[in-house]
Image (cartoon, grey):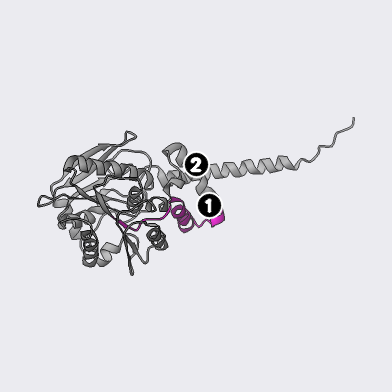
């Protein structure tokens, strides 16, 4: 009996290798999607509250002492959102919407909210979707949050009147949210924006973190981030292309102040220059020496308050 020689088919090996790679990338993409977007305690995020004696502790405690009204909002996709509203000491048309960053809730922005209140604003300090007391399973990296923020600004107009003058301020993911909102045709009552430590692109920020946290080379991280973006599109309803900040800033004619720490190792300082260049409308740039991520206010404090107030006074009627 003659045994037939099995012929060698290279394409079988090629297909097998491709399948193995696809399985590995699929599994890795699912893991990183969970880390990046699924609601959970993010253990790698520090500084969720300010300890006694630290910079901005008094501002945090000031906010805690204010009488607050609970505001609720059902977002366009049915997600229940929650915010904390404090009236100004004197009647005013000025209202600040304050937006927190990744892995924290509204408490991280208490000092900023107190800053605006001290300057005579009504203040709405919100919990983003998938954070704090708000509902939602997935973090939107600024894209979903910007849509929510637009609805919050509409609610402010509804509650406070058509003569409202709204300032939107956010830090980190909240900064990206603020910038994306600016190009989403928010109500005309939104007069100005302040962003602190926002990134220029979801993909670029995740590529940076893939290298910083997991030491992945860019050639490996780049296709992996694309896989994570695909998971995001399927499960969270948005892709990372929708998180390119420049496309929103290019549409924004309203004034924006850009703030960033010069020593930011979480959202690289270089991103603020990209964002500043992309902004179409009036703009001001403040890069704070020696400041790490979202530490510009703690580093400058009084000067930070003065610079923000001076910028906004150019556009907000007192």
Look at mark 1 in the image and give the residue it sits on.
222
The picture quadrant where one finds residue 145 is: top left
Assign the C terminus to one quadrant of the image.
bottom left
How far separated are the C-alphas under marks 2 and 1? 13 Å
Q: Residue at x 32, y 51 (%)?
A: 178
Q: How many neighbours does mark 2 have within 10 angstroms: few (below 14), some (14-19), or many (20 or more)? A: many
Name the residue at the top extreme.
Answer: 1
Q: Work out whether 8 lies above or below 200.
A: above
Instruction: In this rendered view, identify the residue nearer to me: 174 or 254.
Output: 254
Q: Is residue 242 magenta?
A: no
Name the residue at the left extreme.
Answer: 90
Instruction: In this rendered view, identify the residue nearer to me: 151 or 103.
Output: 151
Q: Residue at x 41, y 44 (%)?
A: 37
Q: Residue at x 23, y 67 (%)?
A: 303
Mark 2 vs 1, N-terminal side: 1
Q: Which residues are magenta?
A: 193-222
Whole-percent x and y of residue 27? 53, 42
Q: On the picture, is 224 further left or further right than 20?
A: left
Q: Secondary structure at mark 1?
A: helix
């Amino acid at each position: 009996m003659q045994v037939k020689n099995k012929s060698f088919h290279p394409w079988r090996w090629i297909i097998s290798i491709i399948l193995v790679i696809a399985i590995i990338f699929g599994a890795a993409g699912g893991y990183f999607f969970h880390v990046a977007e699924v609601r959970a305690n993010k253990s790698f995020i520090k500084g969720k509250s300010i300890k006694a004696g630290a910079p901005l502790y008094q501002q945090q405690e000031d906010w805690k002492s204010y009488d607050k009204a609970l505001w609720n909002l059902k977002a366009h996709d049915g997600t229940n959102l929650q915010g904390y509203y404090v009236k100004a000491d004197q009647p005013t048309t000025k209202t600040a919407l304050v937006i927190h960053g990744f892995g924290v809730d509204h408490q991280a922005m208490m000092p900023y909210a107190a800053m605006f209140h001290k300057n005579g604003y009504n203040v709405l300090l919100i919990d983003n979707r998938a954070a704090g007391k708000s509902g939602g399973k997935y973090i939107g990296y600024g894209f979903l949050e910007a849509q929510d923020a637009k609805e919050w600004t509409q609610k402010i107009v509804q509650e406070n009147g058509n003569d409202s003058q709204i300032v939107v301020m956010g830090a980190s993911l909240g900064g990206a949210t603020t910038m994306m909102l600016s190009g989403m045709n928010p109500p005309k009552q939104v007069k100005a924006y302040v962003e602190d430590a926002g990134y220029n692109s979801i993909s670029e920020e995740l590529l940076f973190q893939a290298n910083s946290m997991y030491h992945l080379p860019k050639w490996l991280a780049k296709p992996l981030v694309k896989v994570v973006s695909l998971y995001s599109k399927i499960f969270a309803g948005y892709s990372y292309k929708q998180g390119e900040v420049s496309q929103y800033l290019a549409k924004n004619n309203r004034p924006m102040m850009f703030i960033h720490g010069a020593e930011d190792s979480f959202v690289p300082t270089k991103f603020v220059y990209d964002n500043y260049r992309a902004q179409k409308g009036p703009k001001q740039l403040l890069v704070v020496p020696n400041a790490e991520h979202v530490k510009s206010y703690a580093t400058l404090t009084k000067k930070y308050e003065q610079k923000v107030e001076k910028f906004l006074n150019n556009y907000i009627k007192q």
